[in-house]
Image: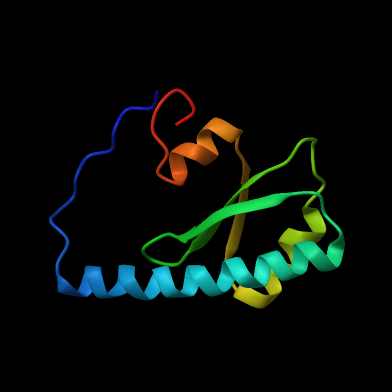
């Protein structure tokens, strides 16, 4: 398990507004990514998406049974979203955890 990072400061109203805006943008980015995945015929299931607070990067978490060559997907997403793209393949237990599951699978 990775150590927790230090807290820099308490979030102010500006940070919270930025976070909420990023959440809305992440929902739109997830819809866009799902459409592109479908168009490209990639066998992957997108779980969620999140922007870093400064929007320097967008992170997509996905599950897949096999390894996926998503280089073309990253290129297309970068053209549309104009930011750095990171795709992380996660396991089904991690998916359950991200979706709020509890118990042995999350």
Residue 27 shown left or right of residue 39 in the figure:
left
**Residue 71 position by quadrant:** bottom right
Image quadrant assignment for residue 103? top left
User: How far across and down, in percent of the image, does residue 63 sit?
Assistant: 66, 42
Q: What is the x, y in percent for residue 43?
A: 81, 49
Q: For the view shown, which residue lies furthest in the right direction?
A: 41
Figure label count: 0
Q: Residue at x 61, y 59 (%)?
A: 85
At horizontal 59% and vertical 66% (from top left) the residue drawn is 30
Q: Quadrant of the C terminus?
A: top left
Q: Does residue 73 lie above or below 6 as drawn?
A: below
Residue situated in front as seen by the camera: 92 or 84 = 92
* Residue at x 60%, y 74% (from the top left corner): 82
Return the residue nearer the eye: 31 or 76.
31
Q: Position of residue 19 (x, y in %)?
A: 32, 68
Report whether 89 appears left or right of 99: right
| Residue 93 percent coordinates (x, y) | 53, 31
Q: On screen, 45 above or below 23?
A: above
Q: Quadrant of the N terminus?
A: top left
User: Is residue 101 positioned above or below 45 on the image?
Assistant: above
Q: Is residue 1 left or right of residue 105?
A: left
Please tell me whether residue 83 is drawn above or below residue 104 in the rendered image.
Answer: below
Who's the residue at 44% across and 67% down the image? Answer: 55
The way the protein has been coloured in the rendering is rainbow
Quarter assignment of residue 23: bottom left
């Amino acid at each position: 398990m990775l150590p927790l990072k230090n807290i820099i400061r308490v979030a102010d109203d500006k940070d919270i507004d930025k976070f909420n805006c990023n959440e809305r943008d992440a929902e739109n980015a997830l819809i866009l990514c799902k459409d592109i995945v479908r168009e490209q015929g990639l066998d992957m299931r997108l779980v969620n998406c999140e922007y870093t607070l400064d929007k320097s990067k967008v992170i997509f978490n996905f599950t897949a049974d096999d390894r996926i060559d998503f280089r073309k997907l990253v290129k297309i997403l970068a053209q549309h979203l104009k930011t750095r793209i990171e795709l992380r393949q996660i396991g089904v237990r991690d998916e359950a955890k991200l979706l709020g599951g509890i118990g042995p699978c999350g």
